[in-house]
Image: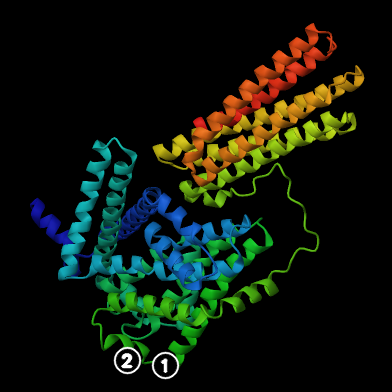
Amino acid sequence: MDILSILSTIIQPDPVKVDTMYIIGQVVMLLAGCGVFMLGFSLLSTHMEKLAGSSLKTLFNKISNNKILGLLIGMGTTIIIQSSSVTTVMVVGFVNMGIMTLTQVVPVIIGANIGTTITAYLAGISVAGGVADLINYVCLACLYVGVFVEMFSKKDKKKSLGLILAGLGAVFLGLETMSSSMGFIEYIPAVRDFLASFDNPILLLLLGVGFTAIIQSSSVVTSLIVAIVAATPTAFGGSGNAVYFLILGSNIGTCVTALISSVGTSTNARRASMIHLLFNTFGAIIFSVMLLIWKDFSKTCLESWINDREWQTCAFHTIFNTTCALIFLPLSGVLVKLSTILIKDKKVQEEKDPSELVYMDKRLLSSPSIAIGMVKKDVFRMADMSMECLDFAFDKFLKRDIDAIPEIEAKTDVISKLGKNITNALVDVSSSQSALDLEKQVNDLHENVGDIVRVAELAENLAKYTRKEVNEDIHFSEDMLEKLKEMCGLLHQQYDLVKNISLECVEKSREKVDELEDAIDNMRRSLVSEHIERLSQGKCKPENNAIFINLVSNLERIGDHLSYIVRV
């Protein structure tokens, strides 16, 4: 037998010659196709997020109490990153940090469920004929084109674009492989008859829940269902409502990812994951009851309009999520209320350690661009603490209060610990496959943390000068103290501008920062010159010298470190 005959036998086997090895080979191909699909799905999701990172930040920055806007943001984000689970986990992270309220969460979660229906249509295209074949071949060609672009491009954005194309091609290749390998079912009467008879609604619902909970992706499960019904027309009772219970079960099962991500989070974050579960479960119950009562639903509403089962399944998935959105969007307040009833407030609310991160949450690492934005907020929370420490230490220096020294040292220690936690978070962001431009932001923030820690350390030096002035009975004139207050005022003006530049991108303030730094430098020189002149005239004691010069030098160095923050 020649090679063409062998290949012909494998591709279109004679039913009489279907043996164990053929079945094993087809099962392996099915698993391989599933693996390629999941790999492509991962590439597509990861690099779409990288390429659209700034767009995602813009979307989530626009979140308000407008339900329609929240719905569109949830839908748009899920279409971009091709994963409702990732969107929901991000939302849980935002709630945990206090950035989003439970009222804002509901429409975003509902929108994410609508956005995830797109994947089922990709699966439908891969198994359909006609014009869909042309689309399928174009998408398969994207695998080669994408790999080619990734290999020969030097810019990160082009590499990400190449991997997106490769991921799309891998998704279609995986679906094509799964669909083709399922042909063996037709040659095994026992399997074919089992799938045909497997139409118990409750069992199908539970199978959908369990399988999706294990895979942790309703998109993968839905795509597999589409491939099965396309390859085996008699599966799940042939025509009728049975296959739709698998879809309903997969929507409940996908909530597992958000539930897992909410472990160890705040009460409201756990309520957000509960809202996701309530929405999908209530929707599944409503449609399950409807399908059980209205046994001709598929025939009346879908089969009379759509001939192919794969497209009927895709259409039902969309109808289910869209109808649930119309039902529950006006009732979002009820879902919030139910979540608060099911998850009670903690009796004793533990105060969060100030050295812990407030804005950054590890759940956001799936979206590095958003994660960096949150880390930056923590960096400037740390900067606020350092400037507050400076104010406190300077006030105690003016009041000659040495009893406050331990408190100043404790504040500095908290800031140092927060700096270490921020550094660890930046390392996590770097290891999450961030692009080159994001990596530069990470490096800049590393330097910012160092400058801010140094500001706190210089503030702590004021405590040492306070101890020295009290122990050695050193006094400064009111005029000189007023000038030191003026210098501290300039530092606060400089810091406010630095913060606006870094967080609000107010670039026009950059020149003003340099002007203030020059003013602080000039003031240090002027104060030191005046001090030396007073020493030479005998108006100032020599023992004042070390404290005064070190004090004004430390204040001037704080101005330098503030300027470094916007220069990196």
The circle drawn on residue 294 is 1
Give the quadrant of residue 116: bottom left
Q: Of residues 484 and 505, which is closer to you in this image?
A: 484
Residue 413 in the image: above or below residue 68: above
Q: Tell me whether the residue at label 2 lies in contact with that at label 1, contact meaning CB atoms closer than 8 angstroms.
A: yes
Q: CA distance from mark 2 to mark 1?
A: 10 Å
Residue 190 appears anywhere in the view: no
Q: Position of residue 519 (x, y in %)?
A: 60, 26
Compare marks 2 and 1 and give the one earlier in the sequence.
1
Residue 43 in the image: above or below residue 223: above
Q: Of residues 203 and 496, which is closer to you in this image?
A: 496
Q: Position of residue 243 (x, y in %)?
A: 38, 79
- Residue at (90% x, 32% y) in the render: 403
Count neighbours of disc 1 (C-alpha within 10 A) and say few if under 14, some if 14 to 19, many if 20 or more. few
In the rendered structure, which amino acid carries the disc numbered 1? Trp
Residue of label 2: 300
- Is residue 65 rendered to the left or right of residue 415? left
Residue 112 in the image: above or below residue 479: below
- Residue at (38% x, 80% y) in the render: 319
- Residue at (57% x, 25% y) in the render: 518
- Is residue 133 rendered to the left or right of residue 79? left
Q: How is the image coloured?
A: rainbow
Q: Position of residue 483 (x, y in %)?
A: 74, 27
Residue 457 in the image: above or below residue 112: above
- Residue at (58% x, 27% y) in the render: 517
Furthest-top residue in this view: 536
Secondary element at image label 2: helix
Give the quadrant of residue 416: top right
